[in-house]
Image (cartoon, rainbow, N blue to C red):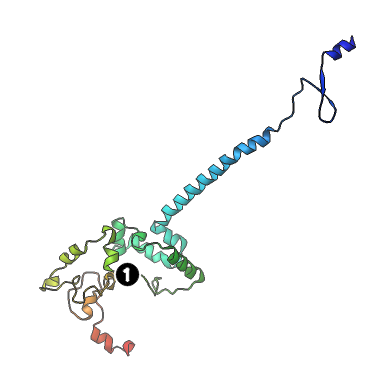
Amino acid sequence: MHQQESDQVPSRLDGGGASVAEGAATPVAPAAKKRRRKWPIVVGVCAAVLVVAGTGFMMWHEQPSFCNAICHSPMDPYVEGYYEDATLSAYAHQVENVTCLECHEPKLDEQIEEGLHWVAGDFEVDETGMLKTVGVRSDAGMCTRQGCHDFDEVVAATENWDGEAGVNPHDSHQGYAIDCSNCHVVHGQSVMYCNTCHDYEVPEGWAAPAKSADAASSPAAA
């Protein structure tokens, strides 16, 4: 009777010679297969996070708030003036939704150089906290690009300045040797540069420069 019961359970030998019942399940390694299937998902999620983070950073990089969030000194007064000082040209640009990077074209080599100067503290500021040395000049090419200002319209708007026939600050007898920023100071008080020699009307809120004769005779010029 015992012999019959044992006959009903066939057996086979495994690789080591041990008897294994036919009905017993063969062990598998499902965890390894799952791990192999998960890695594309993990890579995809990481890539998506990097893309979203990179896009967010670039969008923030284009905002004026980026400048003084990274470099409080010397950028705080520039950004504060852009948002708060209605006497500044920078504020007028902000009202028209013109961002910093639309004028200050971001160039990687320049940004790296500026970053190195900032990290090393290799810059000087005046009593207002603004940079003493400014390397950016605004000329007609810069101010008329991307449809910002139509120079023909600007010239027409200042024709016969101060009621004097033939006088036009934007059609100077010096041609285009004078940059826009000789008069228009975006982050500070603008200056009626023509009055270094002439005596024209000074726009409200602008400064009148020292006369060229006075400047030549001053102790600083000696």
User: How many marks do you count on the picture?
Assistant: 1
In the image, 165 versus 175, the foreground residue is 175
In this rendering, does residue 88 appear at all? no
Query: For the C terminus, which image quadrant?
Result: bottom left
In the image, 50 versus 210, the foreground residue is 50
Quadrant of the image occupied by residue 179 = bottom left
Quadrant of the image occupied by residue 174 = bottom left
Query: For the N terminus, which image quadrant?
Result: top right
In the image, 216 versus 151, the foreground residue is 151
In the image, 188 versus 121, the foreground residue is 121
Residue projecting furthest to the top: 1
Instruction: Identify whether 202 is placed above or below 11.
Output: below
> Residue at point 67% right, 36% down?
32
> Residue at point 89% right, 12% down?
3
> Residue at point 54% right, 45% down?
46
Q: Is residue 84 left or right of residue 12?
A: left
Residue 118 percent coordinates (x, y): 48, 68
Instruction: Identify whether 28 is placed above or below 182.
Output: above
Crowd rating for badge 1 (residues with CA inside 10 Å; few <14, some 14–19, many 20+): some
Q: Is residue 124 left or right of residue 11?
A: left
What amino acid type should be assigned to the residue bearing mark 1? Gly
Instruction: Identify whether 201 is placed above or below 14.
Output: below
Badge 1 marks a residue whose secondary structure is: loop
Residue 102 percent coordinates (x, y): 34, 59
Residue 107 percent coordinates (x, y): 41, 63
In this rendering, does residue 42 appear at all? yes
Q: Which residue is mark 1?
A: 188
> Residue at point 32% right, 87% down?
221
